[in-house]
Image (spheres, rainbow, N blue to C red):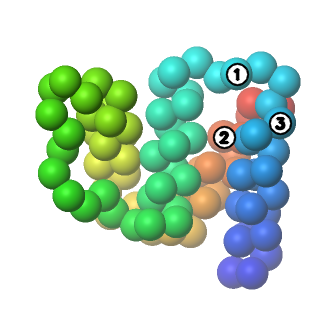
Amino acid sequence: MADLKAKFEQAVADSKKLSEKPDNATLLKIYSLYKQATAGDVEGKRPGFTDIVGRAKWDAWNELKGKSANEAMLTYIDLIESLK
């Protein structure tokens, strides 16, 4: 578990140093996997239609509902590795 957490934290650091900025769909996936790994299932109301960015983030995170923190960390690590 500690090893997974260390790899996840390294992937988070690596995500900030990618040579190219990922497209918006990939950025949403990175965001939602990070939130699922660190905070668990999304809570609260879905943002209103005027908050387009907030709504997209909420929807992406909500799609991961039920995924364990460890699963989300592993998927996050794999995604960042594929973007290097």
Q: Which residue: 55% across, 31% down?
A: 27
Residue 66 spot, x, y in % from top left? 32, 63
Q: Label 3 is placed on what type of residue?
A: Lys
5, above or below 71, in the image: below
Q: Earlier in the sequence, mark 3 or mark 2?
A: 3
Q: Most extreme residue toward the bottom, as rendered?
A: 2
Count of residue discs: 3
Question: What crowding class fits label 2: few (fewer than 14 Cα within 10 Å), some (14-19), or many (20 or more)?
Answer: some
Q: Label 1 is placed on what type of residue?
A: Lys
Question: Label 2 near label 3: C-beta < 8 Å?
Answer: no
**Left-right relation of 53 to 29:** left
Q: Label 2 is placed on what type of residue?
A: Leu
Q: CA distance from mark 1 to mark 3?
A: 9 Å
**Left-right relation of 8 to 57:** right
Comparing marks 1 and 2, which lies closer to the viewer? 1
Q: Quadrant of the C terminus?
A: top right
Residue 65 spot, x, y in % from top left? 31, 57
Question: What crowding class fits label 1: few (fewer than 14 Cα within 10 Å), some (14-19), or many (20 or more)?
Answer: few
- Residue assigned mark 3: 17
Comparing marks 3 and 2, which lies closer to the viewer? 3
29, above or below 50, in the image: below
- Residue assigned mark 1: 21
- Residue assigned mark 2: 79
- Quadrant in the picture for residue 79: top right
